[in-house]
Image: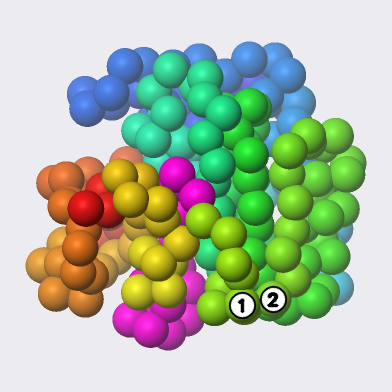
Amino acid sequence: MDQARISGLLRPFLDDASAPASVLSESQLSSISAYLDILLRWNARINLTAIRDSEEILTRHFGESLFAARHIFPEAESNARVIDVGSGAGFPGLPIKLWAKDIHLTLIESNNKKATFLREVIRSLKLEDAEVFAGRAEEFSASADVVTLRAVERFESVLPTAISLVVPGGRIVLLSSVSQNEITAMATGIGWRKGIPIPKSERRILNIGRRI
């Protein structure tokens, strides 16, 4: 897919009233295009995403991830440590890395085939300070300034584990259709900001909380 089309599809996620408008560079668009190509090839062999249409993958997965990225790192300049729990096909972790290239990213994925895919994307895009932990989040011993969680199974049981990986004063970032009231009831020790509706979706919400 050409870069102009990618840019147009992602524009609604980069330009809204709640944060400054942003523009993706030619290098970022090129990386997104390459990532999409790899994803489509691998998705024919292993189930990375149920969505098969390339434009829908861009809006549903890349767009949502970049929407989160610009709210987490509005200046796109940070050397924060970021952990993405249950990465699957790499969302939102890898697009966040494309947005804020200097972060130190760990993708946690227990499925070995998906972990292999994530390593292939990292290698192909020549991403530095990005690694894959092929195991369960409960087995990971380090912590991070930002921990992300998106569309994982067993959300209620995974959320406390994800929060435990956040350093005091750090942030937990959730992309889900779960209401903020439900999340607040599940999570203790977190001060939540008001949830932010995700563009092009009726139910998806970005929730960001800070560990107390």
Judged from the image, the secondary structure of the residue bearing numbered disc 1 is: helix
Q: From the viewer's perspective, is residue 63 above or below residue 70?
A: below
- Magenta stretch holds residue 61: no
- Whether residue 31 is visible, yes or no, is yes
Residue 18 position by quadrant: top left
Tell me where residue 94 appears, x and y as whole percent. Answer: 64, 45
Tell which of 198 and 208 is nearer to you.
208
Secondary structure at badge 2 equals loop
Residue appearing at x 31%, y 16% in the figure: 20
Whether residue 22 is situated above or below residue 115 in the rendered picture = above
Q: Is residue 13 visible?
A: no
Q: How many marks?
A: 2
Q: Which mark is residue 135?
A: 2
Q: Are marks 1 and 2 in contact (CB under 8 Å)?
A: yes
Residue 144 shown left or right of residue 174 in the figure = right
Q: Find out whether residue 147 is within the magenta segment.
A: yes
Residue, disc 1: 139
Give the residue type that dot 2 points to. Gly
Neighbour class for label 2 at 10 Å: few (<14), some, many (≥20)?
some
Q: CA distance from mark 1 to mark 2?
A: 7 Å
State left or right for residue 124 relative to residue 209. right
Q: Which residue does the image show at 16% across and 52% down from the upper left?
A: 191
For the residue marked with disc 1, what is the amino acid? Glu
Position in image of residue 78 (x %, y %): 52, 25
The residue sitting at 65% across, 52% down in the picture is 106
Label 1 crowd bin: few (<14), some (14–19), many (20+), radius 10 Å: few
Q: Which portion, as a residue range, is magenta?
A: 144-159
